[in-house]
Image (cartoon, coloured by chain):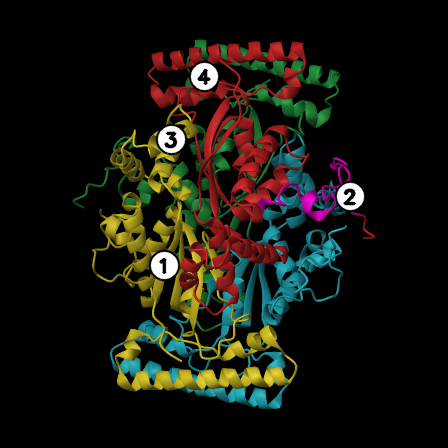
Chain colours: A cyan, B yellow, C red, D green
Amino acid sequence: MSQAQLQVRLLAVTPDALSLIYAAFRQCYSPGYAGDLWPKLLNGELPAQEQAEFVSNIMESGHHSPIEHVGFTFAVEGVSRALTHQLVRHRLASYSQQSQRYVNESGFEYVLPPQIAKIPEARELFETFMEQTAETYARLRELLQEHGRKGAKANEDARFVLPQAAESKIVLTMNCRSLLHFFALRCCERAQWEIRALARKMLAICREQLPVVFETAGARCESLGHCPEGERFTCGRYPRKTTAT
Amino acid sequence: MSQAQLQVRLLAVTPDALSLIYAAFRQCYSPGYAGDLWPKLLNGELPAQEQAEFVSNIMESGHHSPIEHVGFTFAVEGVSRALTHQLVRHRLASYSQQSQRYVNESGFEYVLPPQIAKIPEARELFETFMEQTAETYARLRELLQEHGRKGAKANEDARFVLPQAAESKIVLTMNCRSLLHFFALRCCERAQWEIRALARKMLAICREQLPVVFETAGARCESLGHCPEGERFTCGRYPRKTTAT
Amino acid sequence: MSQAQLQVRLLAVTPDALSLIYAAFRQCYSPGYAGDLWPKLLNGELPAQEQAEFVSNIMESGHHSPIEHVGFTFAVEGVSRALTHQLVRHRLASYSQQSQRYVNESGFEYVLPPQIAKIPEARELFETFMEQTAETYARLRELLQEHGRKGAKANEDARFVLPQAAESKIVLTMNCRSLLHFFALRCCERAQWEIRALARKMLAICREQLPVVFETAGARCESLGHCPEGERFTCGRYPRKTTAT
Amino acid sequence: MSQAQLQVRLLAVTPDALSLIYAAFRQCYSPGYAGDLWPKLLNGELPAQEQAEFVSNIMESGHHSPIEHVGFTFAVEGVSRALTHQLVRHRLASYSQQSQRYVNESGFEYVLPPQIAKIPEARELFETFMEQTAETYARLRELLQEHGRKGAKANEDARFVLPQAAESKIVLTMNCRSLLHFFALRCCERAQWEIRALARKMLAICREQLPVVFETAGARCESLGHCPEGERFTCGRYPRKTTAT
């Protein structure tokens, strides 16, 4: 039983990502063949800086589909099931999540919300409860096994007592367009703190790998210059758009 | 605190579903316009029986895309968060799920796994634990509120102690093609018991509404005549395909 | 051989669309069950006007997913293959298109671009060419059939001479969220004239059926209050956003 | 004016593809973190052969989602608009296609169907017609420009006379799961000859790059051992499944 820490590791990104996006954009607008252009993009005949400027200009005009050709795969651990349940609602993505049926969760780690950690009484209550939960889970598994439910069959029923805080691990892939949308929603102050922390870590990695696509990514207010979240929800960092505008 | 019961209510199905599928199939293969054919399909000029036979024959040939035009919307309650986390992995669907941020879960209902219910000691342990959980949740909410975290802010952190068993409610829409895939996976004996129960209730409703599409739907073995699940996983009801076949 | 006219016919829309969206929104934010709320929405206990106001307010806050539960199915004829090739790039939709393999296209109709129709010499050239094309198509089909290529096999090769102008018919389904995106892109002055005309006809139908969702739909400039299309592309109707804003 | 030849060039594939799939599968079934496993997969601590066997066994059991993490990007030229219109119906993919609005198609190349090429009279008719088409296109563009329609505005209307045979170029990305589905449909003898030729070239590349996923890929009959295409459509290479099986 211990507190889980959010970890994000980049496992893969489509190689030659900038050139790939450049080649795809050019395929839309020029008579030549991307397959012929390709070696020139890799051997430096067309400098990366020029490729980046071209991509940046076209993206600004609202043409985003070519960035879909580049995907990022992350391994994530130290996140709660509360987070993963939100995460997998993003449908333009691929997920491989640790199964609570196939994995024995005795001694599970848990995510401790920072606001609970700050209040000593709450923190103690929370941590004690996690231990009771682990004991209850272990005892239920035992009882199920004694009654003939083995392996995954015992896990899948005992898991009903596991908390939303229980740590999960997940491998996920999103393409750049889907990532921009994910960051727009989940880097926003309205997003729940845990998925916001994940989104920001992912964004930092994306920015380092492919600045031309991600340098202005993040909450929608940052590219719009105003808050689109509605009066009840705005965090106040940017003004709301008035109907007069 | 009480045990939740699975309920499924059909909220909507695309009207004139059989005729819509028929019209879409005919649009692919004939020179006429589906818009002109449409009134004849509704006024009985072409009997429903003939429409159904045509659809049935074409579907058998592996052409399934026209059934996408028909969608079903269900309201579901009495399911666990364990179930909804699996459910929303089906990406060709739309979901509106009860939020544990915006809804106070004090006194939440819970799903009791039948195998636990059968073992008196396990059942008592489970039920007592649910009560302790509710108390812990309520106390954490209180403490968070006392420290200035109001409404959704208190709920979203206190929820970390809520169990996978906590009942959820969800409205979902899938088109017929996505439903066939959902039933193929989730009516299988390999599927977890709770989502299998949901899938079977949904299938019964679909069959009643649109038999031509759903009469042979269900686990893949039922249409294949053999089990495609691999040696480790087969339930034994159908033979596995040998390579010699 | 004659000129095709764009026709759009609404074949189906999810029944009780406003109430369905209302029920889905409420399911997210309230403790009750959408299945229990449902009869009250249909029997007038909660007036449609109140349902519409609630939906309108929530949509303004940027929460759009519940409108996915409602789908529209249209039959379309009198459009070119140039248009349908663009149309089917919208991936969050279902299509059933008239096949040029299974349908004999001798005597095909064609779409005449209005700018060509305005120039007498161009129009005559275009119309004469369409007749030559039909003759070439018919002769190729004949030759293929004489050499043993029957039915679809003859059509599928003869079709290679058919023009982009050749008329097509298609049945399509999109949900409301996908429709809003489609209208945002395709009602814009930047869109090609033919798909813009289709988008506007579809939008007029959607607005009549479900004003709460579609009253402010259309090109992005109309809801943003500025043109997001980039300096090279803007039509000038709305100012472009400057970085200072 | 000349005949186009199909070319397929692999631009990118997700790096360390086998290890990525292996890591994702393991994340589902084991307590460890894929991020910790990752260096061991790359440094040879776990031989590629063992990774491949594990992946192969799990895929056989019907669990395919982890192969979605790996994507392939191809540049394709020498294909007709007839082909690309079919291709882009595959919605789980990303496309960047040469635009007939932004590219002047005077002197376009064309795809000559092999069955037409075999019949001297048909071939001559076809080739002559392509030249007439190019002249008509060029003249229409000229007339449109003389009447004030410049650049893309002239192209987009003149293109209405371009044939389905007109050559196109496209960059496309699909993940492995989507590719398996694409090959299942398009390597089948029922598929139109041109898209079948493209599918087979793509499959050969995929097989070379990632044999563990693609060695048994192709038309559905090859993995099923029977033809699922229905009596009217079967090519006869494999027996149809009888209901008795």
Camera-side mark, 4 or 3: 3
Q: Crowdedness of circle 2 by 10 Å Cα count: few (<14), some, many (20+)? A: some
**Alpha-carbon span between mark 4 and mark 3:** 45 Å
Q: Which residues are magenta?
A: C214-241
The three-letter amino acid code for the residue at tag 4 is Ala
Which x, y percent locates residue B1?
40, 80
| Residue C240 image label | 2
The three-letter amino acid code for the residue at tag 3 is Pro
Relative height, residue B206 to residue B140 (above, below): above
Residue linked to disc 4: D117
Which x, y percent locates residue B232?
29, 63
Same chain for mark 4 and mark 3? The answer is no
Instruction: Choose between C87 and C217: the one closer to the eye.
Output: C217
| Label 2 chain ID | C
**Alpha-carbon span between mark 1 and mark 2:** 48 Å
Same chain for mark 3 and mark 1? The answer is yes
**Tag 2's secondary structure?**
loop
| Label 1 chain ID | B
